[in-house]
Amino acid sequence: MSSPSAAARPIWLVGLVILSAVLTLGAALVSPGVAAYAGSPITARRSAVEGTADAATGTTARPAARAPAGRWAWPVPAPHPVIRPFAAPATAYGAGHRGIDVGAASDTLVVAPDDGVVFFSGVVVDRPVLSITHDGGLVSSYEPVSSSLTAGTAVSRGSVVGTLLPGHCAESCLHFGVRLHGEYVSPLNYLGGVPRAVLLPTRAAPGPASRLSWTDAQPP
């Protein structure tokens, strides 16, 4: 026959096992939550914004903020009047005016309207022409412009790319053209020269004391 202490020993062991199980379960419930938070999309986005630690220096590198895209700069100084507007041709070889003529004095410095790479610099028939490729499938062209730049030269917005020569207009002007994926478009689309359409009222607004009838609410 076993002693009382021997009979109580299994009960003590069972209690120890239960306590260990409770502690293990509690640790398992806490750990996945911490790991899930550390790997959550919110934490990942926060790390991307705040930058990643540089292992070599121990510093944190933050990504540079990208400036919002703005309008192109005019290739010649103000007042840059548009002497002749853009007129899209009916067909690829039809009549039209594939660009705008901008009034400017001879020897005026011509600048790049935006960052790009010189695509062509030379003479076409009897006209010195310069063209620049830009992001988004855009190509800008200028004539008559004398330039010392060569194809492949990178240019930045506002940098001088050439000098305006006489000969295109009766009064000195720069012919400025733009192509989008090979199709000629108005340069004013990128210079901000196309005014936004605004719908104007066709009748006077009613006074504060008047009421609109069903007839008044109908379109004219």
Image (cartoon, rainbow, N blue to C red):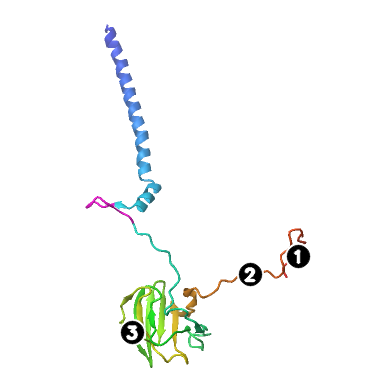
Left or right: where 24 falls relative to 98: left
* Residue 155 image offset from top left, x and y in percent: 34, 75
Q: Who is closer to the viewer here, 47 or 149?
A: 149
- Tag 1: amino acid: Asp
Residue at (27%, 9%) from the top-left corner? 5
Taking depth in this image into account, of 102 and 123 the one nearest to the observer is 102
Residue positioned 49% across, 82% down in the render: 81
Quarter holding the N terminus is top left
**Which of the two labelled residues, at mark 2 and mark 1, occupies the earlier sequence position?**
2
Instruction: Tell me the SS state at disc 1.
Output: loop
Q: Magenta part of the protein: which range? A: 53-62
| Mark 2 crowdedness (10 Å alpha carbons): few <14, some 14-19, many ≥20 | few
Please identify the dominant SS of the magenta region: loop
**Residue lying furthest left:** 56
How many angstroms separate mark 2 from mark 1 (CA)? 18 Å
Point out residue 168 in the picture as x, y percentages from the top left corner: 44, 90
Mark 1 highlights which residue? 216
Q: Amino acid at mark 2?
A: Leu
User: Which of the 4 image quarters holds residue 147?
Assistant: bottom left
Q: Quadrant of residue 202?
A: bottom right
- Quick check: 142 above or below 15? below
Q: State the residue at coordinates (33%, 27%).
A: 23
Residue at image x 56%, y 71%? Answer: 196
Q: Secondary structure at mark 2?
A: loop
| Mark 3: amino acid | Ser
Whether residue 191 sits left or right of residue 13 in the image: it is: right
Q: Position of residue 86 (x, y in %)?
A: 51, 82
